[in-house]
Image (cartoon, grey):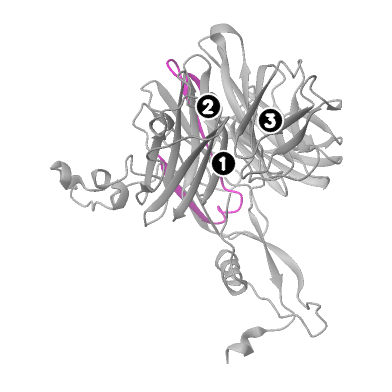
Amino acid sequence: MNRTTLSFIAGVGALAAVTGFAALTSPDASGASPAKAAAELPVERTSLVCPAPSSSDLAETTYTSFTPVTKGAASDGKAELLSAGEESGAAAGDKSAKGEKAGKGEKAGKGGRTAADKPVLTAKEPGKPVTEDASGADSPALVGTADGKFAPGWTVQQTTQVAAGTGRGLQGVNCTAPDTEFWFPGASTAPDRTDYVHLTNPDDSAAVVDIELYGKDGALETTVGEGITVQPHSGEPILLSTLTSEKQDNVTVHVSVRSGRVGASVQALDDKLGGDWLAASVDPTGSLVLPGIPKDATAVRLVVFAPGETDADLKVRLASPSGSITPAGNETLHVKGGMTSAVDLGDVMRGEPGSLVLTPSDHFVPVVAAVRVVRGKGAAQETAFIPAGRAVGKRATAVDNTAKGTRLSVTAPSATAKIKVTASAGSEGGSAVSKTYTVKSGTTQEVEVPVPSGLKGTYALTVETVSGGPVYASRTLTSSLDGVSAFTVQALPDDRGMVAVPEADEDLSVLQK
């Protein structure tokens, strides 16, 4: 995801905004900087957006909010999610256009909000999840903010069960931070797929967004993909088949924001294979890790896209519990510049969990990637997606876990690592517990998930890197749904709950005199 580069002075101001204070000193004449090592402080404010969960009347959705306990965080604060407008434009925000007036004590606002709106969900205390349920097809997108003690590592999961119809099964997505660029390899405009790009604007001004589609032969011709306006505090679902007449099984979606910022996710719904959310891939880079493919996957499809005009040649490796192996017949993958490539790896897991690791065969060419995973057979098949992700880093969290329906996979692609996994208190009762694990280099381990003692309700899993090389992780939720072994997979990237703030050797306030 693209982030605007700040100037030196603006960067200092941004640090001051999220940490309360930041100070730097200029280099001395020798070129060495007298600034001390940067101190890590908890962020003081963060925001997330959740897409509208489903258009099905049979949908049942659970929102779960959680903030890990963070040393040094503020002593007060709040975290809450509010409904966004279901449409953008005047129809969403102006009741009088439909002959209606805002009720007494309510003032219609941008994006359909009113001053009387109450939070859909409000956090209670760090270290304990909070859940809220919704049902039916009228659940809107949500926008949320957390500050003070709730901001560092704030995580929200949206989990939806759809009993029947297109996309039936378990659909899960982490609510995302708003940004300005997103890549979604693995989408589709095929006749048996109904894929939407959900755009959610959390801000007070409109955002202008471009959507580009790339298939096996390059860019697809689109008619209305440029200059899409997303009104303030609004969610906008865009059906991919309305952007192009071309029908292709494997499409990469590129969302770029001209002005403002949005949250973006792709909802991929299949007539026969169920459906799930496709989260954005990590920014284009030369080496990628797609963590935590379930051991009982019956089909795995890898989709890769190379932005630009340069071709990419990639080595494909599977990090298994016993070490790194090469999928037979798929040792390498050639990806033409500006085109989407896909390869079906079949039953590559053979009863063991694993992660795909992509590295350059020759020269470095940035790429993005995702895998579509299928479990089950015949009419009982279900689908989930795993994008290339960021490393766990210092800490990452997955929420809405249950005592029997949770799997946790951890990969150490380049060096042995030690991790700590903490199961939080339950949403309705129970005490937190922690375990440590060692993950050997080049392997993927499906670790024994700790469960809170006396658990009632759901709980959060927080993964921390203790020592060693980088680790990548994903969490799989499973549920039996009318004979279908439904599932959804979420990656666990670094929660970015801490920010580095350089310490000054001297007080620069004299420069202001």
What secondary structure is marked by label 1?
strand
Q: Residue at x 74, y 18 (%)?
A: 348
**Mark 3: amino acid:** Val
**Mark 3 surroundings within 10 Å by alpha-carbon count, few (fewer than 14), some (14 through 19), many (20 or more):** many
**Numbered mark located on residue 451 in the image:** 3
Tell me the distance, in whole angstroms, between the alpha carbons under discs 2 and 1: 17 Å
**Numbered mark located on residue 183 in the image:** 1
What secondary structure is marked by label 3?
loop
Tell me the distance, in whole angstroms, between the alpha carbons under discs 1 and 3: 35 Å
The reply to whether dot 2 and dot 1 touch (C-beta < 8 Å) is no
Whether the magenta-drawn stretch holds residue 352 is answered as no
Residue furthest bottom as drawn: 513
What secondary structure is marked by label 2?
strand
Q: Which residue is drawn at 60% across and 65% down?
A: 19
Residue 371, given in percent of the width and then of the height, sits at 64, 28
**Mark 2: amino acid:** Asp
Q: Closest to the observer: 223 or 504?
A: 223
* Residue 453 appearing in the image: no
Whether the magenta-drawn stretch holds residue 161 is answered as yes
Residue 240, given in percent of the width and then of the height, sits at 43, 32
Residue numbers of the magenta segment = 141-170
Say whether disc 2 or disc 1 marks the residue closer to the N-terminus: 1
Residue 274, given in percent of the width and then of the height, sits at 51, 18
Name the quadrant containing residue 332. Answer: top right
Q: In this view, does 349 lie to the left or right of 458?
A: right
**Numbered mark located on residue 276 in the image:** 2
Q: Closest to the observer: 254 or 114?
A: 254
Residue furthest top as drawn: 378
